[in-house]
Amino acid sequence: MAAPGAAAGCEDFAEFQELLRVMRTIDDRIVHELNTTIPTASFVGKIDASQTCKELYQSLMDAHTSRERIIKSCIAQTSSVVKTLREEREKAQEDVALLKQLRKEQTKLKLMQSELNVEEVVNDRSWKASASLMITDYQDYEPALSEGEHLVLCSPPASGCKLWIQSQERR
């Protein structure tokens, strides 16, 4: 598959969906990513949890921004095609083939617009997963925690990683 670009896959909706599916891999595997990048207690001194957290956060932000840009670009491109076809349709109202093409493009436009809603759900799910699973920098704070509490990342963090104490009972 070609590298993601602004107009990549806009012509064919199936190709557009496949591109988004591939680009959503990081979100689909967020729990695995968290489990493999955030150190356990035995590795806490060997891995910079803050840096790992920031890198994962940046990867998520980049993926979300890139997908949104591509979706909006394809919506704009398809909207332009629909507008052109409408103008042509007004001039040739008897052209059945033109009407079919217009309906096809309108349907594709609606499907692309619905992908913005899907994107919102996917992004929200990833941030919730990272908020509940990212445990970071707990070595410095562990002595201050009460039994049954642990540190979690507040997501999406405004600037890098923020730690919050969360009680086990609230999970």
Image: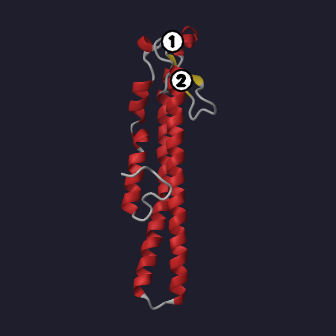
Could you tell me residue 37's position as x and y percent? 43, 25
- Going by the numbered disc 2, the residue's amino acid type is Gln
Could you tell me residue 115's position as x and y percent? 47, 56
Could you tell me residue 29's position as x and y percent? 39, 37
Name the one closer to the observer, 165 or 53.
Answer: 53
Q: Residue at x 60, y 32 (%)?
A: 157
Residue 38 sits in quarter: top left
Can residue 107 be seen at all in this image of the molecule? yes
- Going by the numbered disc 1, the residue's amino acid type is Glu
Name the one closer to the observer, 31 or 8.
Answer: 8
Circle nearer the viewer, 2 or 1: 2
154 shown above or below 126 = above
Q: CA distance from mark 2 to mark 1?
A: 27 Å
55 shown above or below 103 = above
Name the one closer to the observer, 158 or 133.
Answer: 158
Q: Which residue is mark 1?
A: 147
Q: Residue at x 58, y 27 (%)?
A: 161
Q: Residue at x 48, y 53 (%)?
A: 5
In primary-sequence order, the first of circles 2 and 1 is: 2
115 shown above or below 63 = below
Q: Which residue is mark 2?
A: 51
